[in-house]
Image: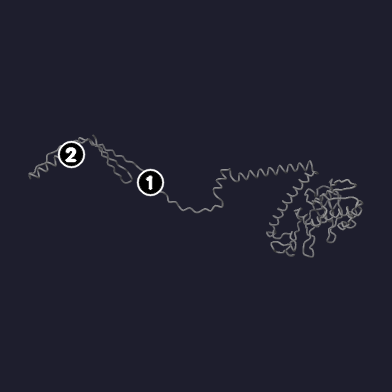
Amino acid sequence: GVQVKVEVDIKPGNTVERHTTVLRTADIKAAEAAAVAAEAAATEVVGTGAQSEPPKVEEPKEEPKVEETAKVSQPEPKEEPKAEPKEEVIWPLDPNQYEEEEERGGFFGTLGKILLVVIGLVIALEIAALAILYFAPDTSIGDTVRNVQDQVMELVDTVKDKLDKEETDPNASQNDPALTPGDETDGETVGEADVVADPKPMADKAKLIQTQMDRNKNIKSVKANSALGYKNGVDYGLDDLNKSQPIANNIWYTDEKGTPVYYDQEVVGALIAFNSQWIDYVNDGDKAVLKLTKEGSDAYNNAVGFSKAGKVKEEFTSVEIGEIRQGEQGFYLWVGEKIQLTENGTTSTAEYQWVYCMEPVGKEMKITDYINVKNK
């Protein structure tokens, strides 16, 4: 048999040395016998007192030791760097939101697609509207398209005016020209001194019309129409009208209460009152309408000379109000009208396009003439 003896030394640097010794069983037994004989001889010498050398015991020949030294290098453990305390980050939104959006293609990518779709729809609707206005301008659907366009333009003008006022006067939003003395806002009464006159005409024609609707009694519909206005190169048959310009200073005067009176409001108000009272004149013979005209003017003479008053029935279906301009002799207002006429049991509808001519007389706006511009 064979016995194997293994010795392991761990040296600095974590280096391991291993020593392996292989011994045969016969050598082990011989070594044990020699040890026993040596012990017996020593006992005998002690007993006799004689000194003699112990018998020589032939040492067994040992098989050459097979030593195997293996050095295994193990990497030194790296010291973990100490984690520095992280600063707390306050997110305005959940950070996971962005990851989710990225997985879905991104928030801005989705928003961009939606905007492209909306822009495409707007373009398609505008093309359809232009086609309707070109091929069927005088139909009910054409009127609807014009009304929608007018409302959009009025909204854009309103926003633009508001932005312009805020740029020139940061407190403009607090000084609303629509508020008149005695009006209340946020529980406070607006006094006469708080009203600030605005020299610019009202860009929002719908709001302008609403300021004068208390003068209406007989007109079913009064609305704005931005398509009605001055055309360059057209001869309107009146030199002052041809040379007219948009109103530059809209302030006419200030009344006894300190309230500013504006040209554009008085022009629109005079037109609404005239057309409303015209129905009373034609249907019932009420001549109050004559007071809205300048005595001796063409408008006055036409009203006085109207021979069908009391003989026919008229109904104002709609009045459309367009551009207002100013000349040296007065003001000019582009108007579209639809009147339903019943005569001898027959009902028909007539459409007109006029330029109403007006002049300030004292502190009242009077109608002096109306020029047919339907074919101009």
Residue 327 in view here: no
Quadrant in which the N terminus appears: top left
Above or below, comparing residue 234 to residue 4 in the picture: below
Residue type, label 1: Pro
The coloring applied to the image is one colour
Q: Is residue 276 visible?
A: yes
Q: Position of residue 69 (x, y in %)?
A: 29, 39
The one nearer the camera, 298 or 141, is 141
Foreground residue among 198 and 119: 119
Judged from the image, the secondary structure of the residue bearing numbered disc 1 is loop
**Quadrant of res 252:** bottom right
Q: Pointer 1: what residue?
A: 77
Mark 2, other Cα within 10 Å: few <14 / some 14–19 / many ≥20 = few
Q: From mark 2 to mark 1, how far is it between C-alphas?
A: 48 Å
Q: Which residue is mark 2?
A: 32
Q: Is residue 41 left or right of residue 100?
A: left
| Comparing labels 2 and 1, the label whose residue is closer to the camera | 2
Please provide percent x and percent y for residue 104: 58, 43
The image shows residue 44 at horizontal and vertical percentages of 10, 42
- Element carrying mark 2: helix
| Quadrant in the picture for residue 52 | top left
Local packing at callout 1 (Cα closer than 10 Å; few below 14, some 14-19, many 20+) is few
The type of residue carrying mark 2 is Glu
47 on left or right of 134: left
Q: Nearer the viewer, residue 135 or 246?
A: 135
Q: Nearer the viewer, residue 76 or 186?
A: 186
Where 1 sits versus 270, above or below? above
The residue depicted at 70 percent of the width and 55 percent of the height is 162
* Mark toward the start of the polypeptide (2 vs 1): 2
